[in-house]
Amino acid sequence: MSASSKPAFKTLDHAQLSGQRVLLRVDLNVPMEQGKVTDATRIERILPTIKEIAKKGGKIILLAHFGRPKAGPDTENSLRPLAKVLADQLGQSVDFANDCIGAEAQAKVGALKSGDVILLENTRFHKGEEKNDPAFVKALAGLGDVYVNDAFSAAHRAHASTEGLAHVLPAYAGRAMQAEIEAIATALENPTRPLVAVVGGAKVSTKLDLLGNLVKKVDVLVIGGGMANTFLAAQGKPVGKSLCEKDMLDTAKSVLEQASKANCTIVLPSDVVLAKAFKAHAPSRVADVDHVAEDEMILDAGPRTIARVEEKFAEAKTLVWNGPFGAFELEPFDAATNAAARAAAKLTKAGKLMSIAGGGDTVSALNHAGVGEDFTYISTAGGAFLEWLEGKPLPGVEALRA
Ligand code: AMP
């Protein structure tokens, strides 16, 4: 069943919020160094939902996880520093409770007035969170009248605060969740064609389900990065010392067969950038894929390949992108990723292409190319974005469907 034929989920447009205690699940799992947030993108994305609920008279109780605490509370994974960051971003005070359930949380939530915001401590300090334990769900639910989920990036987990609550309280998608679902659904479930996907990155083995799902859905699949080496080897090309999963050759062949059955055009590198060392500024040369020497490594796609990719982009109406074309952290092996990303950004800005990107290193690769703002939508979700591309239902999203 396609996402478009599933029941729609409810959004803030359907919620009665005035005077209500709104349990709002957000993603505050931001990168921090020495108590400072180093990338606030995820925080910026949830501000519209918080502000809208506040404006509509709701009392906002923020639920979130942070890190992977092993054995109960610890300072390293405390959300406390985030209350101040949120207050600065929102321009209003944000209270904090030292536990997400219990007497203190109840008292502080009880004292909230319409428009007030409180952040509760890390939900993962309780084992019941990841176990989706009904007793823990009940304890959380007792703090609210309404549940809003704005954490798409945690929606691939069926945890108490991401899934369980949706079954016991009236449940709605927040604006960030809504934008994320709509963007990906438009791209994969109901795209304007031709639909092109770029899948790059290190290994075939981590993206097998994704490749299998995409070949059935897209018109053109561009394979880049280290995983392209495995496909080249499967076609009998020499790959020298390149990253290559020799035990995946049959799998790569089967992906190519599935693509051919589904009329999906596969674009693999026809020329590559070669070096003898995996390091920045290692001496390099461009060669045809038939001419890789035994002591060389493929570290990027070559200019002829990228010209072909750009042609495919120019013919496309929708683009889904995950993973870099090469070892983009090491100059000059970022060239293909940069060039392709800039071409996609230019077409997007000209209104000719809808471009969606996300997952793993993709966001940093696009930021590195200087086009982080220029795609139609860039997902901040890692695992959830990938699972969606794999065609898997996300428990946190499914639970919101009416
Ligand atoms: P992933 O997390 O699977 O998206 O993989 C991203 C990583 O793949 C980045 O760290 C890249 O440096 C790496 N990568 C891309 N192309 C190559 C390549 N040809 N050889 C080795 N590593 C690569």
Image (spheres, helix red, strand yellow):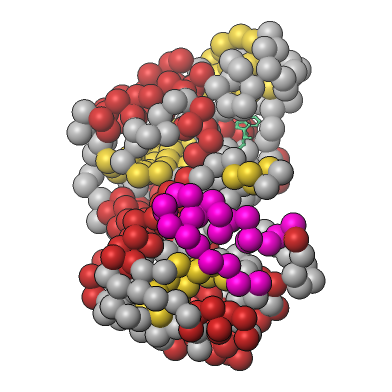
The residue sitting at the right extreme is 71
Give the left or right position of residue 170, taking residue 93 as reference.
left
Q: Report if residue 133 is visible in the image.
A: no
Which residue occupies 27% across, 54% down?
Answer: 186
Q: Is residue 156 magenta?
A: no
Q: Is residue 54 left or right of residue 233?
A: left
Q: Position of residue 320 (x, y in %)?
A: 38, 43
Residue at 28% x, 65% y: name it: 55
60 or 279, which is in the foreground? Answer: 60
In this figure, what is the number of numbered marks?
0
Quarter of the image for the C terminus: give it.
bottom left
Residue 291 vs 248, above or below: the answer is: above
Which residues, given as a range, are shown in magenta? Answer: 76-98
Q: Up-down: is 85 above or below 349?
A: below
Tell me: 4 left or right of 79.
left
Residue 91: x percent and y percent?
A: 41, 52
Could you say which is closer to the camera, residue 249 or residue 100?
A: 100
Q: Within the image, what quadrant is residue 203 found in?
A: top right
Coordinates of residue 23 in the picture (x, y in percent): 45, 76
Give percent across and percent down for residue 179.
32, 56
**Horizontally, is 35 left or right of 348 in the view?**
right
Work out whether 113 lies above or below 199.
Answer: below
Task: Identify the residue shown where x is 40% and y is 44%.
Answer: 378
> In front: 326, or 80?
80
Image quarter of residue 329: top right
